[in-house]
Amino acid sequence: MLPIVNKPIIQYLVEECVNAGITDIILVTQVGQSAMEDYFDNNIGLEYILGEKGKKAHLKIIKDIPKLANFIYIRQKKNLPYGNGTPLLVVKNLIDDNEAFAYLFGDDLVKSKTPGIKQLIDSYYKYKPAAVLGVQKTPWEEVHKYATVKYKNIKKDFNIEEIVEKAPKEKAPSNMAQFGRFIFTYSVINEAEKTPLGLGQELWVADILNRLAQKGKRVVAQPIEGRWITTGDPLNYMKASVEYTLDRKDIGNDFKKYLKNLKLND
């Protein structure tokens, strides 16, 4: 729910999905995250106040938010393990066993002409794999921060042998870093239920996908056109805020002038 300019990060993710043609959004929340559920609902009190004050533009923005998609909310219970793969267990009864679905981490943004998740959808229909994950080339000096993929034969296709978590550049299989965009089939959920807990006693998406690849299932690591921006730490969050502010037609130029005139102390 942290804002980038005037929208919470989660709304950018929802809009990316909607622009890719997705109409149903499942939000997996925990205790204390009711603000996320409230955000995408109608706020009658605020709508009344804005209407009374004649702020039509602001009123339209507020009224349009719940219309973005059909939202389904489900809580992650305390009996389940932590981990970025745990929401797969939470939603297993909401997904048909013959349908593919998009899976997004809440702290990754993608700036691109074609929505990042749409690029993965296209890859899924092209290759019909068990899973597609988004990857992007990252500087070798930074590969130790991310999970990187080992391709079977990158010149032939984008199938992978494995995902290697945060290896130093001397041991990293590539500099193609995984980030929080995926297309999964139900086989990923089935495998998640069988996957032992990994580092920190957490359920990791990388472990689930590695098991599928080891069993001979096709797992595609699709390079994304555009730019991946993470917001998971203070520095990158501030960088994202600056970039998205510069993109704004209403305030971008003024903000650019401010940055140019900013006197920085060494």
Image (cartoon, rainbow, N blue to C red):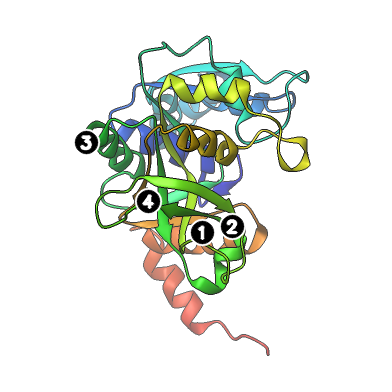
**Which element carries disc 1, helix, strand or loop?**
helix
Helix, strand or loop at disc 2? Answer: helix
Q: Nearer the viewer, residue 243 or 127?
A: 127
Do tag 2 and tag 4 residues touch (Cβ < 8 Å)?
A: no
Residue 129 location, quadrant: top left
Residue 160: x and y in percent read 41, 46
Q: Say which amino acid is labelled 1.
A: Ala
Q: Is residue 64 left or right of residue 124?
A: right
| Mark 4 and mark 1: Cα distance apart in space | 33 Å
Residue 55 visible, this angle:
no
Q: Which residue is mark 4?
A: 152
Position of residue 228 in the picture relative to residue 125 (left or right): right
Q: Nearer the viewer, mark 4 or mark 1?
A: 4
Residue 205 vertical placement versus 164 (above, below): above
Question: Which residue is disc 3 drawn over?
Answer: 126
* Residue where numbered disc 2 is placed: 237
Q: Residues within 10 Å of mark 2 (few under 14, many from 20)?
A: some
Give me the residue at 68% from left, 28% from top: 33
Q: Quadrant of residue 57?
A: top left
- Provide the secondary structure element on which disc 4 rests: loop
Tag 3–tag 4 contact (CB < 8 Å)? no
Q: How far is disc 1 from disc 3 in space, using C-alphas?
A: 32 Å
Amino acid type shown at disc 2: Tyr
Q: Are marks 1 and 3 in contact (CB under 8 Å)?
A: no
Quadrant assignment, res 193: top right
**Discs 2/3, front:** 3
Mark 2 to mark 1 CA distance (whole Å):
5 Å
Q: Sequence order check: which comes first, mark 3 or mark 4?
A: 3
